[in-house]
Image (cartoon, coloured by chain):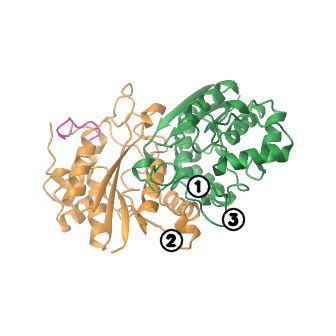
Chain colours: A green, B orange
């Protein structure tokens, strides 16, 4: 069974991506990053998701991106916005170079485990304000990965797979329902409480709730 | 004065790169990465180098790359080789995706500080066995950086500068002598002791010593 590294945040999107990687026959190595995010309940959710969806192992790498500050997700002095997403504007919840850092760590893990692919839950529909969620960014990272690694030098490839990049939240939720995912174990909220209950007001909560509504599915999220 | 992030390891190469960035008129933000390396004396040397060469600030980001294992530089079970470098072979001292991780962190720091450039001491001459030291790799990372960031989206550029990539160790040492660098404060050894004294036997020590000899300069390294 070929190996794949799957970035798992504990949220709905990456849980769906992990289930898709498993469905495609990959032995999944789940990777989470503790980057000083406010929403600590995410990391507990990531552990639950990795176990529930059959990852072979789950590693959490701790890295202090908060040392650089600059984002509402890591800087307690910046409020999490609740006013909705504006097209074409990079939200303050953007963490500088976060996806580049995450993918670099996934690349390291992929090299050590001899993985053929990295699965990543980037989405260009609901989060189009983040530059590092765009398809052209992901293609550039894949090109970099080929040049960066033993696998590339030795002629083996490393695919970067972003299976939900073009899906709406409703489509992702429907895909998850098809795969039998219990989304109650996931946490998307930017400011979930310690037990994983969501605020219901932040952008992540609004997008998630709207996704279940548009899909015509019951929202199993535990709200505070 | 334009800002630049400079990756500073504490070694001879990156000290030279920091001095070159300062000479080119950059306000330098020095970045070191504590990635679980054996040679802890490096990090103390990085602090000395940043201060001595006039960096505006110095940040050390801690990240547990040793969690992935796989390299002699982070895995205590793998011996540091002392038999010299073989052309075309990736040495066991290669840390998986290390430069990609370092550059990703530099990119995050550059975004937060509004830096126009990242200075990086990659070298394709003495370390040609490392895939992520090649010029084509660095060009791919620069392309990625343009797509990854606010600066790229907003039309400002971010240059990746590798000023010593084509220099031999002797040329680097001569450049440092011209810039007045006291290399006694730097540590290159893969297994330096806690006070920064070098073993004199590992590949890094051999290359460094040979560089001073070829340059016809006194080697100020403190050997154990």
Image location of residue A77, percent across then percent down = 44, 53
For label 2, count other residues whose C-alpha is less than 10 Å away and answer few (under 14), some (14-19) or many (20+): some
Q: Is residue A66 left or right of residue A197?
A: left
Describe the element under mark 3 as helix, strand or loop: loop
Image location of residue B53, percent across then percent down = 22, 61
Between marks 3 and 2 in the image, the one whose residue lies nearer the viewer = 3
Of residue A183 and residue A46, the one placed in the foreground of this image is A183
Describe the element under mark 2 as helix, strand or loop: loop
For label 3, count other residues whose C-alpha is less than 10 Å away and answer few (under 14), some (14-19) or many (20+): few
Residue farthest right in this picture = A216
Residue B14 among those drawn in magenta: no
Q: Is residue A114 above or below residue B139?
A: above
Between marks 2 and 1 in the image, the one whose residue lies nearer the viewer = 1
Which picture quadrant has residue B214? bottom left
* Label 1: chain letter: A
Q: Is residue B167 above or below residue A105?
A: below
Please tell me which residue is depicted at 59% across the width and 55% down the height of the picture: A81
Count of numbered marks: 3
Of residue B107 and residue B72, the one placed in the foreground of this image is B107
Between marks 1 and 3 in the image, the one whose residue lies nearer the viewer = 1
Magenta-drawn segment: B189-198
| Numbered mark located on residue A81 in the image | 1
Asked if labels 2 and 3 touch by Cβ distance under 8 angstroms, the answer is: no
Describe the element under mark 1 as helix, strand or loop: loop
Please tell me which residue is depicted at 21% across the width and 48% down the height of the picture: B209
Q: Is residue B169 visible?
A: no
| Residue corresponding to mark 2 | B157
Please tell me which residue is depicted at 26% across the width and 46% down the height of the picture: B188
**Could you give the CA–CA distance between mark 2 and mark 1, rounded to whole angstroms?**
28 Å
| Residue corresponding to mark 3 | A87
Which picture quadrant has residue A21? top right
């Amino acid at each position: 069974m070929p190996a794949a590294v799957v970035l798992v945040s504990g949220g709905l999107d990456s849980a769906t991506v992990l289930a898709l990687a498993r469905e495609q026959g990959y032995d999944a190595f789940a990777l989470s990053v503790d980057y000083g995010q406010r929403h600590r309940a995410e990391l507990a959710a990531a552990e639950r998701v990795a176990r529930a969806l059959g990852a072979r192992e789950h590693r959490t790498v701790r890295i202090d991106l908060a040392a650089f500050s600059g984002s509402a997700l890591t800087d307690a002095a910046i409020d999490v916005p609740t006013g909705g997403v504006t097209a074409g504007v990079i939200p303050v919840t953007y963490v500088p170079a976060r996806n580049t850092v995450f993918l670099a760590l996934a690349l390291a893990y992929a090299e050590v485990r001899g993985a053929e692919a990295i699965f990543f839950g980037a989405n260009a529909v609901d989060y189009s304000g983040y530059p590092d969620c765009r398809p052209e960014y992901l293609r550039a990272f894949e090109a970099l990965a080929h040049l960066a690694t033993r696998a590339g030098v030795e002629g083996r490839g490393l695919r970067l797979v972003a299976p939900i990049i073009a899906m709406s939240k409703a489509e992702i939720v429907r895909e998850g329902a098809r795969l039998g995912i219990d989304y109650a174990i996931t946490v998307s909220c930017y400011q979930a409480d310690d037990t994983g209950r969501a605020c219901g007001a932040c952008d992540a909560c609004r997008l998630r709730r709207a996704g279940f509504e548009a899909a015509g599915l019951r929202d199993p999220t535990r709200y505070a």
